[in-house]
Image: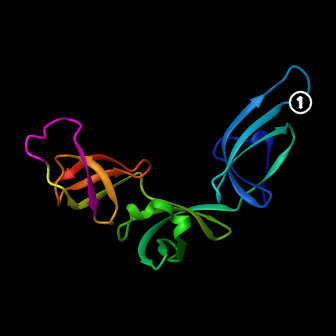
Amino acid sequence: MATYNTSDFRKGLKVQIDGEPYLMIEMNFVKPGKGNALYKCKMKNLIRGTTLERTYKGGDSLESADVETTEVSFLYRQGQDYVFMDGQTFEQYEVAEDVAGDIWKYLKDGMKCTMTLYNGNAIIVEAPLQVELEVVDCAPGAKGDTATNVTKPAKVETDAEFIVPGFIKIGNVIKVDTRTGEYVERVSN
């Protein structure tokens, strides 16, 4: 397995520490007046989501993580699992609900997603940054409600609920930011 020396350390590097994959989210080079250069690193565990801070001396090294990112399509839900397929290899991945997280709110048949694999197992599944969803249920806007900040909950085709402006009606297609779960804009009537 490949190793990274301290001179290779940078943000976005995927390394293995104590047998688990980590993403280097911050790296600061410090050169004190005396002694070796120091590399202060902040890393996120790709399986558990916890963060770790470590300091390395010049000349130290870390093992690279066997992490691969691939584009997959959502096929269907099977019980508590979600089934995705790699468009290149046609390999299917069953992803447990706890790994998938809140992605169910945005999943539509055939939707392209990004999957991170560690030793061939899915550890992260991400939806596109913004998705378009059809509103299937929401309260009608009240007459005279023309204030700018009037909002209401709306149920979309995936059975998720989002807070939308008061002018949104059943049948509208809305754009939602998958990072925050917030309404972005109305796409069509």
Between 77 and 69, the one lying in front of the other is: 77
Horizontal and vertical percent position of residue 162: 32, 53
Horizontal and vertical percent position of residue 81: 50, 75
Between 163 and 12, the one lying in front of the other is: 163
Q: Is residue 159 above or below residue 144?
A: below
Q: Is residue 46 left or right of residue 131?
A: right
Q: Is residue 168 left or right of residue 61?
A: left
Q: Chief secondary structure of the magenta span?
A: loop
Three-letter amino acid code at disc 1?
Answer: Asn
Q: Is residue 95 left or right of residue 144?
A: right
| The N terminus - image quarter | bottom right
Query: Would residue 172 be counted in the magenta stretch?
Result: no
Q: Residue at x 91, y 22 (%)?
A: 34
Between 178 and 93, the one lying in front of the other is: 178
Secondary structure category for the residue under label 1: loop
Which image quarter: residue 57? top right
Magenta stretch bounds: 142-156
Label 1: how many residues lie within 10 Å, few (<14), some (14-19) or many (20+)? few
**Mark 1 — residue?**
36
| The C terminus - image quarter | bottom left
Which image quarter: residue 64? bottom right
Horizontal and vertical percent position of residue 85: 48, 74
Horizontal and vertical percent position of residue 109: 35, 71
Give the total number of marks visible in the rendering.
1
Q: Is residue 6 above or below residue 81?
A: above
In the orientation shown, which residue stands out farthest toward the top? 33
